[in-house]
Amino acid sequence: MDPKTPEYVKKVVMDAAGMVSIRLCAIGNELGLFADLASKGPATSDELAGRLGLNERYIREWIYAMSAAGYLEFDKQSRKATLPDALIPVLVEEGGPLYQGGLFKMFTGLMQPFNELVKAFREGGGISYDTYDGIFWEGLESNSCVRYKNFLVSQWLPEMPDVQAKLEQGASFADFGCGAGRSTVELAKAFPNAKFFGFDLFAPNIEKARANAKEAGVEDRVDFRVHDISKGVPDKFDIVATFDLIHDMADPKGGLRALRQAVKDDGIYVLMDVACEDDPADNQGPMAVFKYGASLHFCMTTSLGQGGMGLGTVGLPEVRVKEFCKEAGFSSVRRLPIEHPLNVLYEIRP
Ligand SMILES: C[S@@+](CC[C@H](N)C(=O)[O-])C[C@H]1O[C@@H](n2cnc3c(N)ncnc32)[C@H](O)[C@@H]1O
């Protein structure tokens, strides 16, 4: 036997344990188990099940599993489980800068269409957006929301003083591929003089975006509409933005040409996409596994499902952003000096 083989066996066991942990964390979030332990303190399985009206036998097994996985501390004397304080920002404080709960839902949802994906490996083609149910879209929204609430206005916009000045002066702003509208809503909250528009081709996202705008009290300044950017642009705007859209598109080059038409000649296009290396083989380590997993289970696959280019999650490195933007008729591309493990931003001029 190759002496390295036992190490690979251990690796498989570790990876399988990680996958199980993600699913059990998704259950913990869905049922409010982590939130209850954080707010009401340590509990036995009886107490936790009683507090939430759940089945004790399932909760007991979940507690043992989560403590074996390192997410809970278990006291053998009192039989109580504790959620460590250090884990509260990661598992419970939804919307906070360290919150990861969206990932549990997102990956649980992403991994549901298994047979469809295997079929696509054999025959090509892909999977359509409506194959993914609510848990995926909720997870995506929750995960994106962390970035928009904590970084977009306070850290990323100050790197684009012209965009900031235009918004302060009452610019029109269009967010294409807006999803549940979290980026648009955060900007609308911060810039009361500006007028905001959000477009997405997937109707359930627009419904959710409208509800989010209403909840934030900005519905009078945010207009969300179902629109497919590949069918052309609805108007011209002072500022146009795409947040994690271009790599997902069936026709990213056509999308960028349309976006060029949507930006006024003295306007600015803000492009946020996924941080990645020019050579796909240079994307390495856990973040790369995460990005390629999202790519195969959604980004590349939904694009191919529409007969598209299938760039994939890490298919839009800086070199390609510059090439595609030049072809689309933009004159300059400036990468912002921000450090974020998932995203990069560019300020692009017509
Ligand atoms: C990865 S999601 C990002 C959503 C949102 N911007 C965010 O950051 O949470 C990509 C979004 O682009 C939308 N989309 C894909 N192709 C589109 C197109 N041609 N026109 C408009 N929206 C599109 C999808 O429906 C999806 O909501």
Image: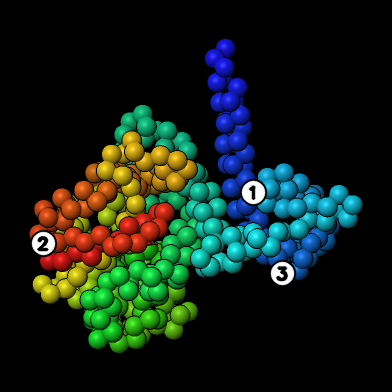
Q: Which residue is mark 1?
A: 24
Between disc 1 and disc 2, the foreground one is 2
**Contact, CB < 8 Å: mark 1 with mark 2?**
no
Label 3 to label 1: alpha-carbon separation: 20 Å
Q: Image quadrant of residue 174?
A: bottom left
Look at the picture and state if 136 lies above or below 268.
above
| Residue 272 place in picture, x, y as percent | 31, 60
| Residue 253 place in picture, x, y as percent | 18, 52
Give the secondary structure at mark 3: helix
**Contact, CB < 8 Å: mark 3 with mark 1?**
no
Q: Residue at x 34, y 86 (%)?
A: 192
Q: Earlier in the sequence, mark 1 or mark 2?
A: 1
Q: Residue at x 62, y 39 (%)?
A: 17
Q: Residues within 10 Å of mark 1 (few under 14, many from 20)?
A: some
Q: Earlier in the sequence, mark 3 or mark 1?
A: 1
Is the residue at mark 1 in contact range of ligand 1, meaning its CB lies under 8 Å from it? Answer: no
Closer to us: 222 or 95: 95
Between disc 3 and disc 2, the foreground one is 2
